[in-house]
Image (spheres, rainbow, N blue to C red):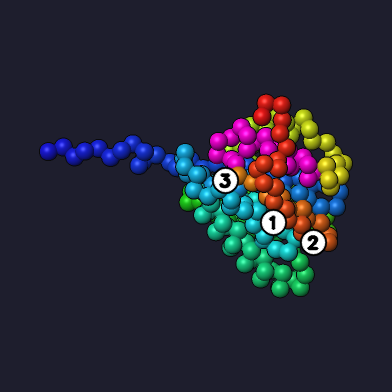
Amino acid sequence: MLEEAAPEWLSEEVKTGTTIIGIEYDGGVVLGSDSRVSAGETVVNRVMNKLSPLHDKIYCALSGSAADAQTMAEIVNYQLDVHSIEIGEDPQVRSAATLVRNISYKYREELSAHLIVAGWDRRNGGQVFATMKGLLTRQPFAVGGSGSSYVYGFVDAEYRRGMSKQECQQFVVNTLSLAMNRDGSSGGVAYIVTIDEHGTEEKVILGNQLPTFFDQ
């Protein structure tokens, strides 16, 4: 007797989605993300904060598998705490990004996660790093997640060097709003964190408070 074949969806890879962005300005960085966690066509969490602290003035934005990304962030957070005790001062942003890169590369076959690392240190000021499967590159701004493919044209056209803190915050909010409107796997609220030498400022923007554009 032939066994009944298992449904095709059981063997398919579960698709995840998000939108994350980080941008440098003179004196700090702004990091942002949407809040929707999806598994395929199912929304499993509407208000997850994807901006995870790695140290006092260093954060990361999570994308990919939520479990994998959160685990990486927790491991790096622990390692940075130990590192800062050893050196007797706050760690550099590049050190945090390097730890993320090392874990991402070492477990590239097991983990499915992409983290944007951003923060401020007294040596190099505000910095944004993209890390992915061995990649480590500092960029003036970085976008990631499924929603990023909908906004590359927007960020390339709207970004300019020398933007102020307020302009960068609005740039992040506008980018997230556009991505959340276009990408079915992004949505919910927008989480924003601004980091400079004085500390961090976290903000939540509800969905009905996000800017709208002509086709919305």
Tag 1 secondary structure: strand
Q: Earlier in the sequence, mark 2 or mark 3?
A: 3
Q: State the image coordinates of residue 199 (x, y, percent, origin top left).
A: 79, 61
Rendering quarter of residue 187: top right
Tag 3 secondary structure: loop
Q: Which residue is mark 1?
A: 59
Q: Is residue 175 magenta?
A: yes
Q: Is residue 40 magenta?
A: no
- The residue sitting at the top extreme is 215
Residue at 55 percent of width and 36 percent of height: 184
Disc ID at residue 127? none
Tag 2 secondary structure: strand
Q: Earlier in the sequence, mark 1 or mark 2?
A: 1
Q: Is residue 185 above or below residue 108?
A: above
Cα distance between the residues tagged 1 and 2: 11 Å
Query: Decide: marks 1, 2 in contact (CB < 8 A)?
Result: no
Considering the image in quadrants, where does the C terminus appear? top right
Residue at 71 percent of width and 42 percent of height: 209
Cα distance between the residues tagged 2 and 3: 27 Å
Name the foreground residue: 24 vs 50: 50
Disc 1 vs disc 2: which is toward the camera?
Answer: 2
Amino acid type at image mark 1? Tyr
Q: Which residue is mark 3?
A: 36
Amino acid type at image mark 3? Arg
Amino acid type at image mark 2? Gly
Residue at 80 percent of width and 43 percent of height: 168
Mark 1: few, some, or many residues within 10 Å (few <14, many ≥20)? many
Segment colored magenta: 168-187
Q: Which residue is mark 2?
A: 199
Name the foreground residue: 157 vs 112: 157
